[in-house]
């Protein structure tokens, strides 16, 4: 609401298991003319991989991070893990990004 997004502009894409599934759903909605522009909302750590997955489907969403101001640039410091949970999340994102690159 703070960003002037109206409730009728929010669309739930349905059941998805991962970011790739979500990109496929959005691609289908785009092809059907149900949506034109959209915002990809996720965490800063997941944004690069998510944006690449969407780009691989020919989609160019506006990007919005849930955990940092949109004007901030993602740096190496953002990937510094905080505890064992942070290490797990960091390795998960890294492995996911490498897997995505290798599938291209």
Image: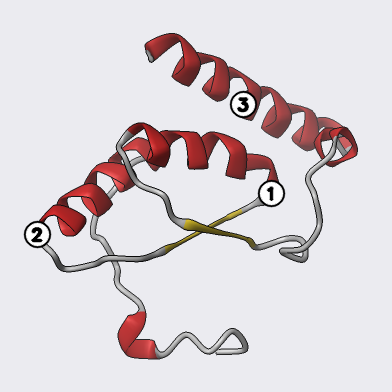
Count the labels in the image. Answer: 3
Image x and y of residue 57, in percent: 30, 36
Q: Are marks 3 and 1 in contact (CB under 8 Å)?
A: no
Task: Indicate left or right for 52 with 23 as reference.
Answer: right
Of helix, strand and loop, which one carries label 3? Answer: helix
Number of other residues with Cα within 10 Å of mark 3, as a class: few under 14, some 14 to 19, many 20 or more? few
Q: Which image quadrant for residue 63?
A: bottom right
Gap in Å between the C-alphas at discs 3 and 1?
A: 14 Å
At x 80%, y 50%, the residue is 73
Image x and y of residue 56, in percent: 36, 31
At x 45%, y 9%, the residue is 102
At x 53%, y 23%, the residue is 96
Of helix, strand and loop, which one carries label 1? Answer: helix
Gap in Å between the C-alphas at discs 3 and 2?
A: 33 Å
Of callouts 3 and 2, the N-terminal one: 2
Task: Indicate left or right for 49 with 86 as reference.
Answer: left
Q: How is the image coloured?
A: secondary structure
Image x and y of residue 39, in percent: 46, 64
Q: Are marks 3 and 2 in contact (CB under 8 Å)?
A: no
Q: Tell me the residue that label 2 is attached to.
A: 32
Label drawn at residue 44: 1
Q: From the viewer's perspective, is residue 64 above or below residue 3?
A: above
Number of other residues with Cα within 10 Å of mark 2, as a class: few under 14, some 14 to 19, many 20 or more? few
Q: Tell me the residue that label 3 is attached to.
A: 92
Task: Indicate left or right for 61 with 35 as reference.
Answer: right
Of helix, strand and loop, which one carries label 2? Answer: loop
* Quadrant containing the N terminus in the rendered view: bottom right
At x 50%, y 40%, the residue is 50
Mark 3 vs mark 1: give the one in front: 1
Mark 3 vs mark 2: give the one in front: 2
- Can you name the residue that lies furthest to the left here? 32
């Amino acid at each position: 609401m703070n960003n002037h997004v109206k409730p009728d502009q929010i669309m739930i894409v349905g059941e998805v298991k991962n970011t790739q599934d979500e990109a496929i759903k959005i691609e289908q909605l785009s092809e059907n003319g149900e949506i034109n522009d959209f915002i990809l909302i996720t965490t800063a750590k997941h944004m690069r991989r998510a944006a690449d997955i969407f780009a691989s489907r020919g989609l160019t969403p506006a990007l919005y991070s849930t955990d940092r101001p949109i004007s901030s640039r993602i740096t190496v410091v953002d990937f510094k893990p905080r505890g064992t949970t942070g290490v797990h999340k960091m390795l998960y994102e890294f492995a996911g990004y490498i897997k995505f690159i290798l599938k291209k």
